[in-house]
Image: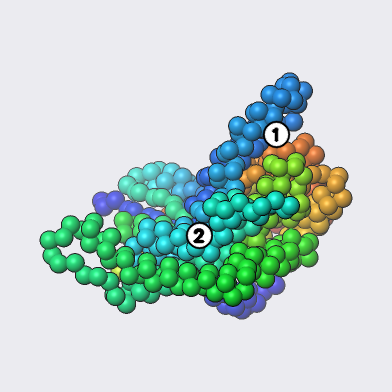
Amino acid sequence: MNQSLFEKMSKILLPIAGKLNNNRYLQVLRDAFMLAFPLTIFGSIAVVVANLPFLDKVMSEGSLNTLRTILNVAPQSTMGVMTIFVVFGIGYYLSKSYDVEGIFGGAIALASFFILTPFILNVEGKEAVQNVIPLDRLGAKGMFLGMITAFIAGEIYRAIVQKNITIKMPAGVPPAVAKSFSALIPAVVTLTFFLVVNIVITQAFHTNMHDVIYKLVQAPLVGLGSGIIPTLIAIFVTQILWFFGLHGQIIINSVMDPIWNTLSLENLNAYTETGKVPHVISKQFIEIYTVGMGGTGMTLAVIAAILFFMRSKQMKQVAKLGLGPGIFNVNEPIIFGLPVVMNPLILVPWIFAPMVVTFVTYLAMSSGLVPPPTGVTVPWTVPIFINGIMATNSLAGGLLQIVNFAIVLIIWFPFLKFIDRMNVQKEQEESAKQAS
Amino acid sequence: MKMKRILLACSSGMSTSLLVTKMQEYAKSIGDEVEIWAVGQDQAKKEMERADVVLIGPQMSFLKGELQKEAEKYGIPVDVIDMMAYGMADGKKAYEQALTLMGEK
C-alpha cells in the first residue's frame, strides 16, 4: 500500500472521524455516561463481593442471603437507577455546551423525564400500586426515553435562555435570587411542553411514553445491537480506523455505547435477581473480550510472540516497550511503533484475529460453555485473565481469554515471522555496512 | 532561558503519559527547563491557555482543526506527533518536534 492511498483514505476518514468525535450530541452522551461511571464501579464491587464463588461453602444459606440483601442496595442505587444520572448528565452537559447554566439544564431534564414516567406500578393479578416509581423505568428499561427526553428538554431550555426571554431583575437583587428567577421561564415552558405530551399520550392513547419509546425505539435497536453480525461489523470498522491511525473506539463507541450499556444494565438486573444473564453481547463483552487482551486488536499475544519467537532487534525493542502498557491494555506502542498503522503486511491478522476471537467468544458464551459477562463494570485497564474472571464471575471467563490469546498468536505468527525475516536481513546488511 | 510548556492531547491522556515521561527525561538531560503534561481531549482546550505548544497523539489527528482554531486565540502552534516517535515513545524526537514548532530550532 503506497503513501498516496494512505493520504486518500485519510482525507476521507479524517473529516468523518472528526465530525463524529466532535458532534455535540455524541460528545454530551459520552460525558453523561462518564458521569455515571464511578458510580457503576461502586455498584459493581458490591455485586462481585456478593457473588464470590466460594461464599456458599463458607456461609450458611441464611447468612448468605442476608449478605446479598444488604449489599444489593449498592447496585440498585447506582446501576439500577442509571437513567437518572444519564438524564441529568445530558441536561447538564448539553446546556454547558451552549454556555447556559448547566445545573438548571440538568434539573429540568430530570423533571421532564419524571413527567413522562408513570407513577404507578402494575403487578400482574393484583391491584395497581399508586404513587410509586417503578424502579425498572429508572434503569435499563427507561434508558432510551431518558436520553431522548433529556436532549429535547435541554434544547428547549437553552433555546429559550438564549432568546433571552428571562425575567430581568433590577440592580441590587442578590445574584443568587436573580439566577433562580432567570431560570423560571425556560423551566416553565420546557416542563409545560412535556406535560402536554404526557397528557396527550395518556389521555388520547391510553399508554405512556415509556412503553412507546421502549417498544418503538429501544427494543428494536438493542435487539439489533445484541446480534453477532452487527458486533462483528463494529469490530471490523474499529480495526480499519485504527489501521489508518485513528482512534477506532472513540468513534465507534460514541454510536454504540447507548446500546451496549443498556444491554449491560439489563444483564446486571437479571443477574442480581436470578443469577442468569440474558445477553451475550454487552459493553463488557466488547471491553473485556476485544480490548481487554492487551488493547485494541488483542496485541498482548503479538508482544508475547515477538518476545519469545522473533529475532529482529527493532521488533524486540517495540515489544519490550509495549509490554508494560500492554498488560494494562494500552497498546499505542504496538500500533504506531511496530507499526500496525498502514502496514499492509499486518492488515490481515490485525482485522482477522479480533473478528475470529469475537466469534469464538460469542459461540462459547451462547452455547453455555462459558458464562457471559454479568454486567458488572470492570475498568478497561484491568489486565487480561483477571478482567475475564471479574467480568463473568467465573474462572471459565479467564480461561476463555487464554484460548483467545492462543488464537491471536497463531493467526499472527506467520505474518510476524515474515516481517521478522525481512527485518533481520535488513539489520544484518546494516551491521555489515557499518563493519566495512 | 524561559521555561517551555508543552501540552500533549490524546483520547484520555493515558497512552500519551508514557511519552511525557520520556520527553521530560530528554529535556532534563540537555538541561532544558520544561513543563510537559498530557490531558484527554475534553480538557485540551482549557489547558491550552498555559501552554507554548500543543502536540496531538496521532490517533486523535482529527482533532487538529478544532484545536488549531482554539490555539489561534493564544497564538500557539498545534501539530500531530510523528507516528514513529509516538509509537517508540521517542522522547528526543517528540521534544525536538515541539521545539521546531515553537521556532526554537
Q: Is residue B74 left or right of residue A250?
A: left
Task: Tell which subunit mark 1 falls on.
Answer: A
The furthest residue to the left: A172
Residue A420 in view here: no
Callout 2: SS: helix
Indicate which label's residue lies in the foreground, 2 or 1: 2
Name the residue tied to disc 2: A114
Front residue of B95/A360: it is A360
Image coords of residue A16 (percent x, y): 57, 74
Task: Tell which subunit mark 2 falls on.
Answer: A
Callout 1: SS: loop
Identify which amino acid the numbered label 1 is placed on. Asn
Front residue of A396/A249: it is A396
Name the residue tied to disc 1: A51
In 3D space, how far apart are the residues under numbered discs 2 and 1 (Cα atoms)?
A: 33 Å
Identify which amino acid the numbered label 2 is placed on. Phe
* The C terminus of chain B lies in quadrant: bottom left
